[in-house]
Image (cartoon, rainbow, N blue to C red):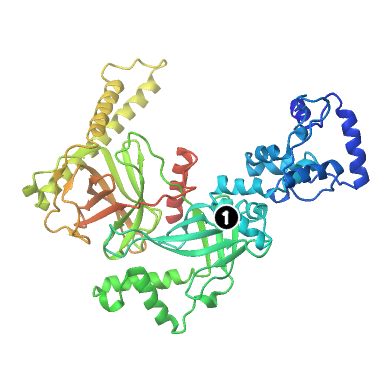
Amino acid sequence: MAVCARLCGVGPARGCRRRGAAREQRRGAAGDSEPDTDTDPEEAGGGGGAATEDEEVAERIEGGRPAPHPGEAGRAPLSLLELPPELLVQIFGSLPGTDLPSLARVCTTFRRILRTDTIWRRRCREEYGVCENLRKLEITGVSCRDVYAKLLHRYRHILGLWQPDIGPYGGLLNVVVDGLFIIGWMYLPPHDPHVDDPMRFKPLFRIHLMERKCATVECMYGHKGPHNGHIQIVKKDEFSTKCNQTDHHRMSGGRQEEFRTWLREEWGRTLEDIFHEHMQELILMKFIYTSQYDNCLTYRRIYLPPSSPDDLIKPGLFKGTYGSHGLEIVMLSFHGKKAKGTKITGDPNIPAGQQTVEIDLAHPLQLPDIENLRDFSELSRIVLEVQEQIRREEEEKEHKQEEDDRSQQAASQPAAKPEGGEGAEGEETTAGSEGATQDKAPASHPFVLPMGVISRNEDYPRTCRICFYGTGLIAGHGFTSPERTPGVFVLFDDDRFGFIWLELKSFSLYCRIKVSFQNAEAPSREAFDEMLKNIQSLAT
């Protein structure tokens, strides 16, 4: 602290008492008030009386004149105040914007220098990626400091990925800085069954700072343009939006016109094109349910899964086919010897947040040749054999654990581990894990769906890398009687995989969502696991 004080010229450096007394005398004559203690960046560079010395500094900033050397020529500066103002602008501009309010409280000179828009223009660019020509803001009377403090810094907690609370349907919202706006984009899967097509997206809200000195929140829902809205940050990982003009959501043709418009946007077709009666019921149910949330929504933060060099493929977000429910968004993550697929969007049977598939990476499957693979009974036999093997392994593990517990209770001293016990088992597991790792990218094998297995998309890959035993979650309407049933995880390439649901005799194809999401990385593995647990508990 003493070193910092001497550098700033406010501590016990030689000659500083004389300068300090003179500065206090000038400050008293000018009626300078005590520095503000608020740490909001909005306060940095504002207020404070102007002393003669500060006016000279400001003139040098504006005129670009170098600062004269105080005292003897060539003497090194003893204080930051003796550095040229243009150099102080460069130094202050390299600091995080959240630190600048504290810097502004050091002295009136620093506060005056922090009024320089160059500093805040750099912070907007480096911290939030604003690459627009911020100089145009001068026409509207809005400074770069206003953009940083009243828009970017104020709403920084809502940047990133979010899952809206829309009952079982969920969703994927990406809040980003887009030029001089903060926009919430709702990402939608492509129209069923075109799983290879890119994602669709539409704006739900936007925040901007243009002609007024406070940020404006606008709802983008409906077809009548932006209108008044409100955002409330409930806590760090949760916020809510509210529309104050829901009449903008209504259409002149009433609910029937709204439904037909929604159907074209959501499914890319009309109701007359959908011949399956059950599918019509599901579509109508979704429209009625989601329409209730057009004026107020709550969002909870989600993270992208962390990756590891040992992962089978890169984890991330995928879009997959789910029969009459259409395409849904699934998050693939790896957890040691397991891989999990968690629904980000859902349906009345398996809601968003539930774990739709689980892959056992310790049990790869050796599929039969292409001719025998067409026989569904042959594939079922292979899968059920592995299922029985896993059941026996779990029973043996439980039995061994019970014996170990009894041994520990009976012995006064910890018994030595017998040869070939847990150590041997661990070696065997490691070997199996290494084998699975080595099989990450084997030569491609021919692949075809067995006869009788239904696929929404017949254009699936005809070669695969490797297959694993897995389980899929199925349930009745309203998530009743959920159970995990055996299936086959099929890895096609780095961006596509599939899952064969044996009990349903159906096939889901998943394709990677190739979008670079910002501010979506989990701070730690523990934070990601906690997020998965939270969204699953909310779905339950």
Give whichever of 418, 99 is nearer the camera: 99
How packed is label 1: few (under 14 Cα within 10 Å), some, or many (20 or more)? few
Identify the image quadrant of residue 367: top left
Q: Is residue 2 left or right of residue 89?
A: right
Task: Label 1, secondary structure: give it.
Answer: loop
Q: Residue furthest left?
A: 371
Q: Which residue is mark 1?
A: 133
Residue 37 appearing in the image: no
Toward which corner of the image does residue 229 lie, by quadrant? bottom right
- Whether residue 271 is visible to the viewer of this picture, yes or no, is yes
Amino acid at dot 1: Asn
Q: Position of residue 65 (x, y in %)?
A: 74, 41
Residue sitting nearer the eye, 462 or 508: 462
Return the residue found at the far bottom. Answer: 253
Name the residue located 8 percent from the left edge and 44 percent from the top edge: 369
Image coordinates of residue 462 in percent, x first then y, are: 15, 50
- For the point 30% across and 77% down, the residue is 271
- Measured along the vertical axis of the image, is residue 349 above or below residue 102? below
**Picture layout, residue 306 above or below residue 196:** above
The residue lying toward the viewer, choosing from 411 and 445, is 445
